[in-house]
Image: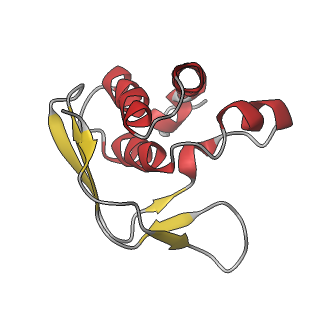
Amino acid sequence: MSAFLTELQMENATRKDDGHWRVIAPLVYQSDVAGMTFTVPTGFIIDLASVPRVPIVYLLAGGTSNEASVVHDFIYSTHPLPRNIADAVLREASAVTDVPAWRRWVMWAGVRLGGGSHWNPQVAA
């Protein structure tokens, strides 16, 4: 069964409030969708899903399921599996943290529509 095996521990990664965070203890997530366990290492820098700060978008999807966002950012950085599975892991991990189904769909649709440039940053967006 999919589960977070450790709790998310993070701190502000910079002295300013720019939305970047540092993982301060490994975050371990076991995924049924991916058929593997992910360990986000101490020191990994994240931006918690890169949700645009446009009011309605942030209201719908921002600030939810930080744990799932950290795992998703890690997968996007390391590419251990295809992008569509990475995005499915975001939705799955959000369900594990009790994010409502409608919000999981909004988050998933957002990464499917806007995540391509972050998946392969060498390709011009």
Give the side of residue 26 with respect to residue 46, left or right. left
Instruction: Please count the marks in the image.
Output: 0
Give the side of residue 103 with respect to residue 70, left or right. right
Give the side of residue 86 with respect to residue 107, left or right. left
Relative to 71, residue 55 above or below: above
Q: Nearer the viewer, residue 113 or 91?
A: 91
Quarter containing the N terminus: top left
Picture coordinates of residue 76, whole percent (x, y): 40, 40
Relative to 120, residue 70 above or below: below
Give the side of residue 41 with respect to residue 62, left or right. left
Residue 79 found in image quarter: top left
- The color scheme shown is secondary structure
Picture coordinates of residue 44, whole percent (x, y): 40, 64
Picture coordinates of residue 2, whole percent (x, y): 24, 35
Q: Residue at x 67, y 80 (%)?
A: 15
Q: Nearer the viewer, residue 26 or 78?
A: 26
Viewer can see residue 120 = no
Q: Residue at x 37, y 24 (%)?
A: 88
Viewer can see residue 14 = yes
Picture coordinates of residue 101, whole percent (x, y): 52, 21
Q: Residue furthest right?
A: 55
Q: Residue at x 72, y 39 (%)?
A: 52
Quarter containing the C terminus: top right
Relative to 68, residue 107 above or below: above
